[in-house]
Image: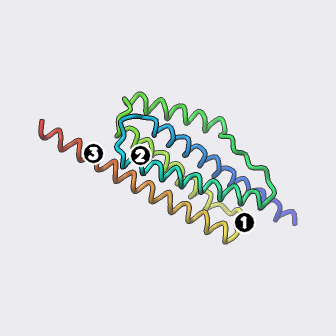
Amino acid sequence: MIFQHAQTNKSTQILQDLININNDRISAYQSALKLGNIDSSIKDAINDIIADGVYYRQQLVKEVNKRDAEVKNMANILGKIYMAWNDLKVTLAANTQRAVISSCMYNEKIALHAYQAALSKDAGISNNLLQMLEEQEDGLKKNYELLRYFHEMHRLATSSLSYLV
């Protein structure tokens, strides 16, 4: 019985870490939307990614609550430092659309690594929970590919313009 309790705590901690990751993602994308020079199609994609993040967070909170654990919704100090650095990086990049897209791609890549780490750990995660996390990971992959598409389109448009000059 002690072993099962330890596994439950471990899976709860993983869920809480993923909640924090999604909180950071949502915050980063909300910051990106505040920048003025982003195409409407990219803004729409970012709004969809925010909605996904909110939904993922709700699912994760529900699972933590099933385990009678207290959900920690506050971003940890490292997350806050990372977010400040990321905001500064985007600001220093002159708020270009390319910088925003690159920053968003980086955020999704970090989130994907976190999900992959969570799925690879032997945390005694139930099959239902494992399926939910895999579905969320698939959504993150789709978001990353969409952002990569926008990045490539912006790169091609920029390089085409340089040939015209």
Q: Which mark is residue 43?
A: 2
Of label 2 and label 3, which has the lower sequence position? 2
The residue under the point 45% across, 45% down is: 104
Q: Residue furthest left?
A: 164
Q: Are marks 2 and 3 in contact (CB under 8 Å)?
A: no
Camera-nearest residue between 144 and 95: 95
Place of residue 12 in the rendered image (x, y in percent of width and height, measured from the top left): 74, 56
The amino acid pointed to by label 3 is Arg
The amino acid pointed to by label 2 is Lys
Q: Tell me if residue 135 comes above or below residue 61 in the rendering.
A: below
Disc 2 from disc 3: Cα separation: 18 Å
In the image: residue 77, left or right of residue 165: right
Q: Which mark is residue 144?
A: none
The residue under the point 59% across, 49% down is: 22
Q: Quick one: SS at disc 2?
A: helix
Q: Mark 1 highlights which residue?
A: 124
Q: Mark 3 highlights which residue?
A: 155
Place of residue 49 in the rendered image (x, y in percent of width and height, measured from the top left): 49, 52
Place of residue 143 in the rendered image (x, y in percent of width and height, measured from the top left): 45, 55
